[in-house]
Image (tube, rainbow, N blue to C red):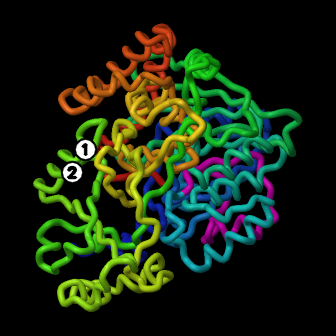
Amino acid sequence: MHTLQAVKVREDVTPEKLRGGFYTPEPLVAHCYSRIRELTDESQIRLLEPSVGDGAFLRGLANSSDLRPRLAAVHGVELVPAEAEKARTALAVAGLPGTVDVASALAWASTTDEWFDAAVGNPPFVRYQFLSPADKASLPKLSERLKVPMPGVGNVWIPVFLGALGRLRPGGAFAFVIPTECFTGCSAGVVRKWLTTFAAELRFDLFPPQSFPGVLQEVTVLSGRRVAEADAPAAITVVEHSAGQAPRRWGYPLRTDDRTWMRYLLEPRHLGAVADALDLGTVHRLHEVAKLEVSIVTGANDFFCVDDATVAAYDLEAWIEPLLPRSRHALGLCYSGLDQDATREAGARCWFLNFDARRPDPKEHAGPARYLEQGKAAALHERYKCRIREPWYRVPSIRSGGLLLSKRSHLFPRLILNEARSLTTDTIYRGEMRSDTEISKAALVASFHNSLTLLTAELEGRSFGGGVLELVPSEVGRLSVAAVAGFERHLPMLDRVARTQDPEELVRQTDASLVKGGLLPMDLIGLLADARETLLTRRLDRNRVAPAPAMVA
């Protein structure tokens, strides 16, 4: 039995990581100031920098010859006294008028009465779990002041950014370096909603991942002007910068019902192709033909998912059921009994422990009782999902799904026909076809891995560190699928391709089958494939190792 990896706590993380102490490259600083110059014509600018660090933005002012004479005052906020002193030195060396407060940006923004004409910065990228108790106490106050609910905020850059914008007078300009999770992250939804209501001349400047040495997160420069309240839905301009090429730009009006802004990373011709596909009678939302849900939630997968050796050591044969431990163990599009046997032979945790009340009481048998005691010794019974059960080791909702879908993926999510009816834990979604559809499970699986469906996975899902794509069940339901009854005839061939070729060959072959079957036209597939490649490349490029120590705040 393996020891579970614990969630990191404050004591496990470096001080620099806790305060987001990574700094901004000069080109990003200069780009922010160029946008401030474009957005404001004020002759006496009061400038705010809410996350000063060692003064990178203040030093950048010294090189901004046309903006510097227009500064009436600079106000910085920095939590760490030593860093604040560096920032004061930067102000003095540059001969700039201003002050640097030693304070938390959250506490400061929730209490200050000052107003500013412009704001720049690079908010600290710090997870909520690492905030100090004082900062956590400041969040409700700031939320009330901004009239912005922030119950699910996961990273401190969000309230620091909104707190700074809240101190801008109407017409004030802003330019910030922020993570590209702003396009899609759930907690960043409060930022997107605020910008839709209180911002104008919004612009995102995109740079190829790893453009700036040492920057570990993919970042964008977000700029615009604060307004009292938008008279009409705001518009957004996207500028994509590529090495050795002129920047490309496009724009869209913002829609208030947009869940994410990932679609704005695509050019209009690409979004037009998505809209054209959705008008076809062969295209459906996934929730219209199938229902997928979270699989078995154990609270301790390493305990309830076991291999042959553990079964033998504790005499657990009477309590085991076949399990597909990870989607990677399903090599093809169909997971059969032979595949389950291969998973077992590979030494994987291919058995699930089902201590249902209809089975023998494990406490009355020496081996299982000993196994349960080891679980208690590891304090598994105190974990939330376990302690709310009686007894703690009896897992509910143990059933298989005829359809299986990977929750997290590298290249793309995979839909699998579960011929073996193996169980899965919450790393894989389970599902069945709706009773009112004529499309079979096999037909849906055969058609799933196409450019349209996988593009909508990029648009609907969210990406985390390392470029991993994750979909929650509601996002899965919104995926666009092109499927008709009878398409299951392609499944044997596509299953072989999935087992013997590279993953992208599966996508190409599925696209070709859809075109040949008349489900999607060739010209549309070409545009959809190009659009998917755009988003996929940007996401996967986050996997590259940064060439130098982290520098982004």
SS assignment at label 2: helix
In the image, residue 457 lies at what x, y percent?
A: 49, 36
In the image, residue 250 lies at what x, y percent?
A: 62, 20
- Mark 1 is surrounded, within 10 Å at the Cα level, by few (under 14), some (14 to 19) or many (20 or more) other residues, namely some
User: Does the magenta-highlighted stretch encompass residue 110?
Assistant: yes
- Classify residue 492 by image quadrant: top left
In the image, residue 49 lies at what x, y percent?
A: 63, 54
- Mark 2 is surrounded, within 10 Å at the Cα level, by few (under 14), some (14 to 19) or many (20 or more) other residues, namely many
Q: Which mark is residue 336?
A: 1
Q: In the figure, is residue 398 to the left or right of 282?
A: left
For mark 2, what is the residue? 340
Q: From this view, report whether residue 399 is shown above or below residue 211.
A: below
Q: In the figure, is residue 287 to the left or right of 333?
A: right
Residue at 52% x, 58% y: name it. Answer: 124
- The amino acid pointed to by label 1 is Ser
Closer-to-camera residue (450/248): 450
Instruction: State the quadrant of the N terminus.
Output: bottom left
SS assignment at label 1: loop
Q: From this view, report whether residue 502 is shown above or below residue 144.
A: above
- Asked if the residue at tag 1 contacts the one at tag 2, i.e. Cβ–Cβ closer than 8 Å, the answer is yes
- Disc 2 from disc 1: Cα separation: 6 Å
- Classify residue 221 by image quadrant: top right
Q: Which region of the structure is painted magenta? A: 95-123
Residue at 62% x, 71% y: name it. Answer: 103
Closer-to-camera residue (233/549): 233
Residue 249 showing in the rendered view: no
User: Does the magenta-highlighted stretch encompass residue 478?
Assistant: no
Q: In the figure, is residue 216 to the left or right of 191?
A: left
Q: Which mark is residue 323?
A: none
Closer-to-camera residue (264/481): 481
